[in-house]
Image (spheres, rainbow, N blue to C red):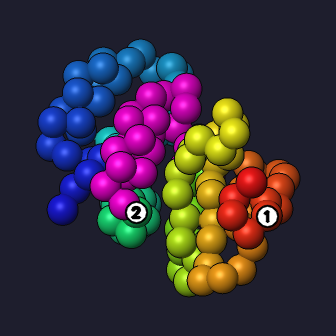
Amino acid sequence: MAYLYTPEFIQAQKKRYGDLKKGEKIPNGASIALSDACQHKREEIEEMLSRLSANDREQITIRLMNDKEFESTYNELVVGFWLNSLGYHVEYEKNIQGLTPDWYVSHHNEKIKCCNLGRSLTLGENGS
């Protein structure tokens, strides 16, 4: 199932960037959507999205559709996927005391961790 690279999204990208003049740069997100050579990357992104909760997947998909947010959101997605593959439960931008870390991470009875790319914060057992 396609979450990001739907036929409608790819068509919109073709319409938006299909007539660029030679030498004009296509943003990375659009380049991945439009290039046949990037099929593996599209499949990788779809696989990572498929492992998220519906709410997290929707939030991240919306951000990946934005040219200005694609790269940072892709990096956040990779980290969330990696944490999930290690057996952690991850929640994207969960509101904790007015803050929204990139990932709220928990594992059984272990302490809760919140992480933004580049830093992390350990919370008490109850998340406070």
SS assignment at label 2: loop
112 relative to 81 in the view: left or right: right
| The label number, if any, that marks residue 80 in the structure image | none
For residue 48, say whether it is visible.
yes
Q: Nearer the viewer, mark 1 or mark 2?
A: 1
Residue 56 among those drawn in magenta:
yes
Q: Quadrant of the N terminus?
A: bottom left
SS assignment at label 1: loop
Where 113 sits versus 76, above or below? below
Amino acid at circle 2: Leu
The answer for how far apart the CA atoms under marks 1 and 2 are is: 25 Å
Q: Residue at x 83, y 56 (%)?
A: 121
Q: Residue at x 79, y 60 (%)?
A: 123
Segment tinted magenta in the rendering: 53-75
**Residue 67 placement (x, y as % from top left):** 48, 28
| The label number, if any, that marks residue 124 in the structure image | 1
Q: Main secondary structure of the magenta part?
A: helix
41 relative to 6 in the view: left or right: right
As drawn, which residue projects farthest toward the left? 7
Mark 2 surroundings within 10 Å by alpha-carbon count, few (fewer than 14), some (14 through 19), many (20 or more): many
Mark 1 or mark 2, which has the lower sequence index? 2
Q: Nearer the viewer, residue 119 or 3?
A: 119
Q: Which residue is mark 2?
A: 52
**Residue 63 placement (x, y as % from top left):** 45, 35
Q: Nearer the viewer, residue 38 or 88?
A: 88
Where 74 sits versus 100, above or below? below
Residue 32 among those drawn in magenta:
no
For residue 37, say whether it is visible.
no
Q: Nearer the viewer, residue 96 or 73?
A: 96
